[in-house]
Image (cartoon, rainbow, N blue to C red):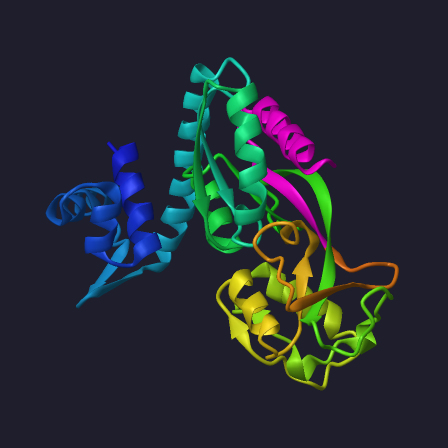
Amino acid sequence: MITLRQLRYLTALARHRHFGRAAADCAVSQPALSMQIRELEREIGAELVERRPGDIALSDIGIDVVRRAEHILASARDLVDFARHRDVLSGQLRLGIIPTLAPFILPRVLPLLQQQYPALRLEVRETLTKPLLDELAGGELDSVMLALPAERDDVEILPLFTDAFLLAVPAGDLLPAHSRVDIADVDQRRLILLEEGHCLRDQALAFCATKRRDQPAGLAATSLTTVMQMVANGYGVTLVPEVAIDAELRDARVKLLRFSEPEPGRNIGLAWRKTSPRGKDFAALGKIVQEALGR
C-alpha cells in the first residue's frame, strides 16, 4: 500500500535531487528515506529514481509519479485544513512571498494580523516565484503573495494592488527631480537589475526593451537593497517598485523619478490552490494587506 509518507519523501527527493538533503528536509535518516523510496518503487512496479554518485535523476515514470504525488499531498493537506480551520485566519497558515515584497510588506502587515487575528500562527517562506508555486502545488504552502500573472491554471488568484515602478538615478543625475520621465530616458547600458529568476528583472526588461532591444542590460545583483546601493554610488540606474520606497531604500544619494502616464508597474496578488477550503482566510488576508498599505 502506497503511503503519504512515501509520496512526501519522493517529492522531497525530486526537489533536492540528493538523498542526504531530502532526508534532512524530511527529518529522517538517509537509509530510512532510501528504504521508503525502494518500497514505493516495488509497490508501483517501476524504477522512479536513477541513482548516481552524489546525485539522482527521475525516470520518465518518476516525473509523472512526482507530479501526481504533489496533487495527492496537496489534497490531503486541504482535507486537514477543512477539518481544522473553522474560524477565519486561525491555526497555522504557511505563506510564501517573493523577495521584492517581503521586506516591505511584512513589517506593515504582521502587526495588523497579530492585532486582529491573534489565533493565527503564520509561517513565512521567502523565495523566488517558481519554487513558491511548486511548493504551493505540492501542499507545502497554503498561499503565495507574488507578482501576477501566476501562469498556472490550478490556482485561484486574488488581485491586491498595483505597484508602480519609479526610475532611481544618482542624486547628481541631470534628469530634473520633479518632471515625469519617459522610457527613452532609461539608458539600458547603465541599467542595474536583479539576477535571473527574479520576476522584477523580467518585468523591468519587458518595459525597457520596448524602445531599446538592441542594447544589453548591464549589472545584476541579488537583492533590491544591493541594487539601490549601487545606484547610490553612481554605478547606474534601476527601476524600483513604489512599495519599497518608504522602507530601507530611502537614500539622499538617490533621486526617484516618476514615469509619464501610463506608468509602468506590476500587479500584486495572492494565489492559492483551487482545491483549498480556506478561501475565506485568503480573502481576509488580502483585506489586511490592502488595509496595511492604505489601498
- Where is residue 77? Give x, y as percent: 41, 29
- Where is residue 10? Give x, y as percent: 29, 46
> Which residue is found at the position 28% from the left and 52% from the top?
13
Magenta stretch contains residue 190: no
> Which residue is found at the position 80% from the left and 75% from the top?
175
Numbered range of the magenta stretch: 266-295
Q: Residue furthest top?
A: 86
Residue 271 to residue 256: above or below: above
Q: Based on the displayed image, in which of its 4 quarters is residue 16 positioned? A: bottom left
Residue 137 to residue 90: above or below: below
Q: Which part of the image, by quadrant, shows the C terminus?
A: top right
Relative depth, front residue between 148 and 73: 148
Relative depth, front residue between 186 and 173: 173
Q: Relative to 244, is 92 on the left or the right?
A: left
Q: Relative to 4, is 129 on the left or the right?
A: right
- Where is residue 173? Give x, y as percent: 73, 77
Q: Residue furthest bottom?
A: 214
Q: Residue furthest front?
A: 252
